[in-house]
């Protein structure tokens, strides 16, 4: 069977659309893992990136942290967390968050540092506080690049959240892991196709957010 036949056979099988192992349930689990990991990574990376970018301090330290985070093998970290913490969602979240923090952190810092200093200086000259300068002047101008960092992190999480299946959790990785074990390549290809499709949906969501959240003036200048 070729790839198209595998895909057609997987999605045309009604057994794959119902029950705890059905496509809707597995997609829901995968989205849950992705949103939780992205929220945790954003809660860490955004504030640090915004503050360090605003003050201009800590850029070298952020680069070192980001490099170290990218160098850590996600699957190896999953195995280590499983040995330390046992089976559970926490030991999956840790590798996913470690994977997602660097692009959010570095991109947010670079976005803040790339803001035109003229309106920032003018805002300070008008007597605006540092918090007002950050949230009313710098953040709107930096938002397109910040969203690109969040988008990169989200895509990486969607693609990597399949590791949850290796520690007996759900998600779309369940099809890939179970399919390989059962030598059911129809299931493997179907799971990989769903992951790719979810990644494309994630891109579309961020495109829509960009169109909605970023002002036209900033989009044109970008």
Image (tube, rainbow, N blue to C red):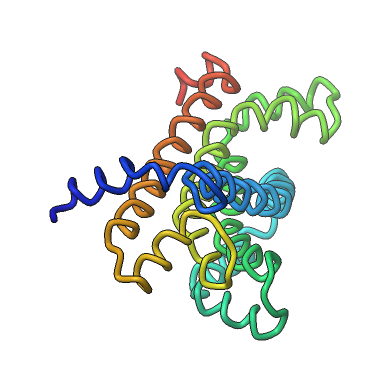
Could you say which quadrant of the image residue 121 lies in?
top right
Q: 221 and 175: which one is in front?
A: 175
Question: Looking at the image, which residue is at 67% across and 31% down?
Answer: 138
Q: Is residue 220 above or below residue 107?
A: above
Q: 58 and 173: which one is in front?
A: 173
Q: Is residue 174 above or below residue 111?
A: below
Hey, which residue is sitting farthest top in the picture?
216
Give the side of residue 125 with respect to residue 115, left or right: right
The quadrant of the picture occupied by the N terminus is bottom left
Q: Is residue 36 above or below residue 161?
A: above
Hey, which residue is sitting farthest left in the picture?
2
Could you say which quadrant of the image residue 200 lies in?
top left
Q: 120 and 153: which one is in front?
A: 153
Question: Looking at the image, which residue is at 63% across and 60% down?
Answer: 97
Question: Looking at the image, which residue is at 65% across and 85% down?
Answer: 83
Where is residue 107 shown, x and y percent of the image? 55, 48
Where is residue 201 shown, x and y percent of the image? 44, 35
Where is residue 24 shown, x and y percent of the image? 52, 41
Counting the numbered discs, the total is 0
Q: 126 and 71: which one is in front?
A: 71
Where is residue 179 shown, x and y percent of the image? 36, 65
Hey, which residue is sitting farthest bottom in the picture?
83
The quadrant of the picture occupied by the C terminus is top left
């Amino acid at each position: 069977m070729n790839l198209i036949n595998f895909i057609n056979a997987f999605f045309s099988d009604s057994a794959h659309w119902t029950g705890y192992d059905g496509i809707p349930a597995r997609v829901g689990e995968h989205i849950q893992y992705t949103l939780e990991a992205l929220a945790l990574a954003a809660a860490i990376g955004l504030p640090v990136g915004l503050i360090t970018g605003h003050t201009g301090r800590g850029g070298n330290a952020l680069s070192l942290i980001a490099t170290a985070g990218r160098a850590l093998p996600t699957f190896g970290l999953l195995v280590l967390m499983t040995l330390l913490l046992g089976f559970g969602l926490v030991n999956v979240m840790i590798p996913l968050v470690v994977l997602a923090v660097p692009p959010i952190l570095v991109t947010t810092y670079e976005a803040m540092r790339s803001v035109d200093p003229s309106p920032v200086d003018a805002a300070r000259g008008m007597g605006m506080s540092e918090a007002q300068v950050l949230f009313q002047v710098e953040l709107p101008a930096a938002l397109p690049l910040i969203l690109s960092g969040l988008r990169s992190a989200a895509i990486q999480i969607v693609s990597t959240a399949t590791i949850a299946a290796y520690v007996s959790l759900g998600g779309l990785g369940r099809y890939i892991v179970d399919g390989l074990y059962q030598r059911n390549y129809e299931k493997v290809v179907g799971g990989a196709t769903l992951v790719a499709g979810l990644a494309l949906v994630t891109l579309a969501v961020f495109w829509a957010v960009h169109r909605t959240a970023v002002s036209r003036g900033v989009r044109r200048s970008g």
